Image (cartoon, helix red, strand yellow):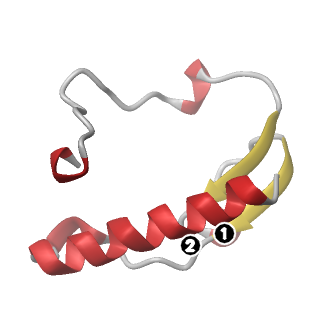
Amino acid sequence: MAELGYDLCTHASKSLDQVGGEFDAVVTMDCGDNCPWVPAKRREDWNLPDPKHMDDAGYRAVRDDIGTRVRRLLENV
């Protein structure tokens, strides 16, 4: 993400137990009915490959796809 100007060094994942309230949109990453329920006005399940074991080009492709989808989602929320 540093390539795009984002410093994630101080960021950490949070448990859903640490996140409360209702959201405008919740996006899950291809987990369908196995995803935990989070209240939201809009829900989307994106069928994306897991970049965990991809090479740099594969990781970048997934990252850029997510960026495009997020921008599109923000335009429609």
Residue found at the very far right of the displayed protein: 41
User: Which class describes the residues within 10 Å of circle 1: few (<14), some (14-19), or many (20+)?
Assistant: some
Q: Earlier in the sequence, mark 1 or mark 2?
A: 2
Please, what secondary structure does the residue beneath circle 1 have? strand
Amino acid type for the residue under numbered disc 2? Asp
Task: Choose between 70 and 11: the one closer to the eye.
Answer: 70
Q: In the picture provided, is 33 more to the left or to the right than 9?
A: right
Q: Position of residue 31 (x, y in %)?
A: 58, 68
Q: Position of residue 54 (x, y in %)?
A: 16, 76
Q: Quadrant of residue 19?
A: top right
Decide: is 76 above or below 8: below
**Residue that label 1 marks:** 45
Q: Residue at x 46, y 62 (%)?
A: 67
What count of labels does the image hold? Answer: 2
Amino acid type for the residue under numbered disc 1? Asp
Q: In the picture provided, is 35 more to the left or to the right than 51?
A: right
User: Do the residues bearing badges 1 and 2 touch, measured as CB atoms within 8 Å?
Assistant: yes
Disc number for residue 30: 2
Q: Quadrant of residue 11?
A: top left
Task: Choose between 11 and 14: the one closer to the eye.
Answer: 11
Q: Quadrant of residue 5?
A: top left
Q: In the picture provided, is 1 more to the left or to the right than 16?
A: left
Please, what secondary structure does the residue beneath circle 2 have? loop
Q: Residue at x 15, y 72 (%)?
A: 53
Gap between marks 1 and 2 measured at Cα: 5 Å
Q: Position of residue 25 (x, y in %)?
A: 76, 48
Q: Position of residue 37 (x, y in %)?
A: 75, 47
Task: Choose between 12 and 16: the one closer to the eye.
Answer: 12
